[in-house]
Amino acid sequence: MKKIEFREKRFFPAVCITAALLFIMGFFIYKKVINPYKEKPHVRIGLILDGDQATPYSENFYNALSEVERVYKGRVRTIIRSNVTVDDEENVIKDLVSEKCDIIITNSYGFGDVAKKMAKKFPEIEFIQATQSNADKKAVRNYHTFMGRIYEGRYIAGQVAGRKLQELIDKRKIDEDEAVAGYVAAYPYPEVISGFTAFYLGMKDQCPAATMKVKYANTWSSYQKEYDIAEELINEGCVIISQHSDTTGPAVACEDATDHTVYHVGYNQSMTGVAPTTSLVSTKINWTPYLVSAVGAVLSGHEIEADIDGRVNGNDAGAGFDKDWVRMLDIKSTIAAPGTEKMVADSIAAFRKGKIHVFKGNYKGVDPDNPDDKIDLNKEYIENKKCSAPSFHYIIDGIEADD
């Protein structure tokens, strides 16, 4: 019995010690792996841009980070690296890591693969990528993607253009077969194709006779190339020009047109400053709500997606007019067709209530990279159903797209 008692006395402390060790190890794993977040008194943000403040797209990120700094006064320091190429992105990220950044934000679709790879290499830093669809929470916990549902804004911009075209037809300034819009597109990517399709469908909603020509610049930010393509479209008879490209070149080309009046519909910023007599309206993604929430989450020690007011799917988030992630800019009432402002307000309200179905109608389309891949929009295509980045990639009836 004594031996049994002796063993029991020795066994009890051993159990306690083992339990204590397991608790400590479990707590460590919880803090470092399961719950790696902790409150921070301040954060350092690295922002990587493919352009600079002269390019409207990149300027919107400058403006969003300025608002972040205003909201979190004294708690945020921002380091910006502009005009970064894809080839140099990894070196720039390493530089920002050496600057002890807590958050690194990248703004170009082409930056996504490297950003995701570097996020895996530096798990203590939160990486935030705009306009991508490659977030995978299980594989890379600290890599996040986000984007506004810009097809909503482009659809309404198209409505503004279509209403103007219909006015020109009704006043017999153009014939129905002259109701042609031109579109300066950066690349034949789903993001771009989705955008100009939404624009076209918005036009058709207001002007059934409208058609559209698309020409690709194969660059995001060449002022001269975008200007030249817009000029080509104007010379081919287009009476409205829109764009998915990053400079003011197309707007200036409309303002410079002499043979006939050509109206412009812009993207990323108001174009009334460079095209005061021809700019009808612009639309843009508002990056501010997401970035304010994301930075606030890091400061508070929260998982980023837990604090995002939008549609969240894993580490990806998106929203539209419903959460102010998309905006319309500067309707020029002096040249827009009568009733345009009310139409825009009504459409924004309808989007907020989920009452507009953009990619639906009596249209058929073909994937430009795979002629065997076809679509019939009598069955609605739900854009942004699985991720915040656009996925629609078909050229539909009535759109002429040059390779």
Image: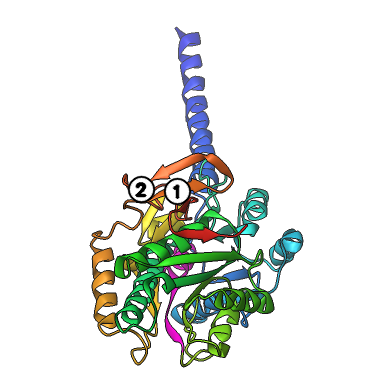
Q: Is residue 331 above or below residue 100?
A: below
Could you tell me the amino acid type at mark 2? Leu
Q: Quadrant of residue 288?
A: bottom left
Observer able to see residue 18: yes
* Of 195 and 398, the residue lying toward us: 398
Q: Residues within 10 Å of mark 1 (few under 14, many from 20)?
A: some
Mark-to-mark CA distance, 1 and 2: 8 Å
Q: Is 7 situated left or right of 379 in this image?
A: right
Observer able to see residue 106: no
Q: Residue at x 47, y 84 (%)?
A: 270
Q: Which residue is mark 2?
A: 377
Residue extending furthest top?
1
* Of 275 and 296, the residue lying toward us: 275
Q: Quadrant of residue 320?
A: bottom left
Q: Residue at x 46, y 42 (%)?
A: 374
Residue 220 drawn in magenta? no
Instruction: From the top left corner, tell me how far across and down residue 110 is, in percent.
Output: 64, 58
Q: Is residue 396 above or below residue 61?
A: above
Colouring scheme, one of rainbow, by chain, secondary structure, one colour: rainbow
SS for callout 1: strand
Q: Is 292 situated left or right of 351 in this image?
A: right
* Of 335 and 110, the residue lying toward us: 335
Instruction: From the top left corner, tell me how far across and down residue 356 is, in percent.
Output: 27, 60
SS for callout 2: loop
Q: Residues within 10 Å of mark 2 (few under 14, many from 20)?
A: some
The C terminus, quarter of image: bottom right
Instruction: From the top left corner, tell me how far across and down residue 56 is, in percent.
Output: 56, 78
Q: Residue at x 36, y 73 (%)?
A: 162
Q: Which residue is mark 1?
A: 365
Could you tell me the amino acid type at mark 1? Gly
The range drawn in magenta is 278-300
Callout 1–callout 2 Cβ contact below 8 Å = yes
